[in-house]
Amino acid sequence: MTRKIIRTDQAPAPVGPYNQAVVASGSLIFVAGQIPLDPVTGELVGGDDVAAQTDQAIANLQAILVAGGASLGSVVKTSVFLKDMNDFAAMNAVYARYFGDTDAPARACVEVARLPKDVRVEIECVAVVS
C-alpha cells in the first residue's frame, strides 16, 4: 500500500500530530475532521451559528479534497460530530446544499461532549480519488 500525505494552505493547518488527509493506494482519500476555522486567519468562523460553522467546515473539506485529487462529488462517507443534536436540522440544511439528497454519501451523525475550540460541528470524510 502506498500513502500520500495531503496538505494545502487552502484549509486550516493541522494543530497536532496528524495530516489534513492521506491518500491510500492512490484510490481513497481520508480527510481529517474539519472544524470551522478560516484557513488564512486561523480564526473561528460563524460564532455560535451552526449553519455558518457547517458551511466553513465543508469548505475546508472541499479544499483538502481538491488538493488530494478528489471532490465533494466523490465523497463516499462522512462523519458529522455535533455539540448539540438540536443543531441537526440547521447543519443538515447546509450539508444538503453541498451533497444533495439522492446522490449523497453514507453518513454518521453523533452528538459529542466537546469539540476542539468548543465549535458546534466537526466533519470528516472518505472519498474516491479521480
Image (spheres, helix red, strand yellow):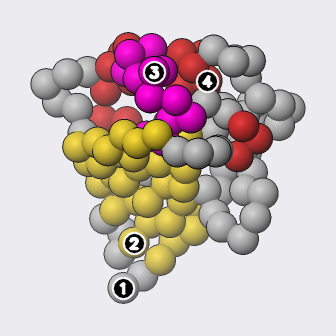
Task: Find disc 1 in the rendering and name its residue.
Answer: 1
- Position of residue 113 relative to residue 100, above or below, is below
Q: Are marks 2 and 1 in contact (CB under 8 Å)?
A: yes
Gap between marks 1 and 3 measured at Cα:
41 Å
**As rendered, which of 127 and 27 lies closer to the eye?**
127
Residue 21: in magenta span: no
Q: Amino acid at mark 3?
A: Asn
Residue 109 position by quadrant: top left
Residue 81 x %, y %: 48, 41
- Position of residue 2 relative to residue 114, above or below, is below
Q: Is residue 66 visible?
A: no
Marks 4 and 1, the one that precedes in the sequence: 1
Marks 2 and 1, the one that precedes in the sequence: 1
Residue sitting at x 45%, y 14%: 90
Q: Amino acid at mark 2?
A: Ala
Marks 2 and 4, the one that precedes in the sequence: 2
- Position of residue 62 relative to residue 102, above or below, is below
Task: Find disc 4 in the rendering and name its residue.
Answer: 53
Gap between marks 3 and 2 measured at Cα:
35 Å
Q: Are marks 4 and 1 in contact (CB under 8 Å)?
A: no
Instruction: Tell us which disc is closer to us: 2 or 4.
Output: 4
Residue 34 x %, y %: 59, 43
Using the image, tell me which numbered label, if any, was put on residue 86.
3
Residue sitting at x 63%, y 39%: 35
Per the rendered image, the range of residues in magenta is: 80-92
Q: Amino acid at mark 4?
A: Gln
Q: Chief secondary structure of the magenta span?
A: helix
Q: Amino acid at mark 1?
A: Met
Residue 104 x %, y %: 22, 32
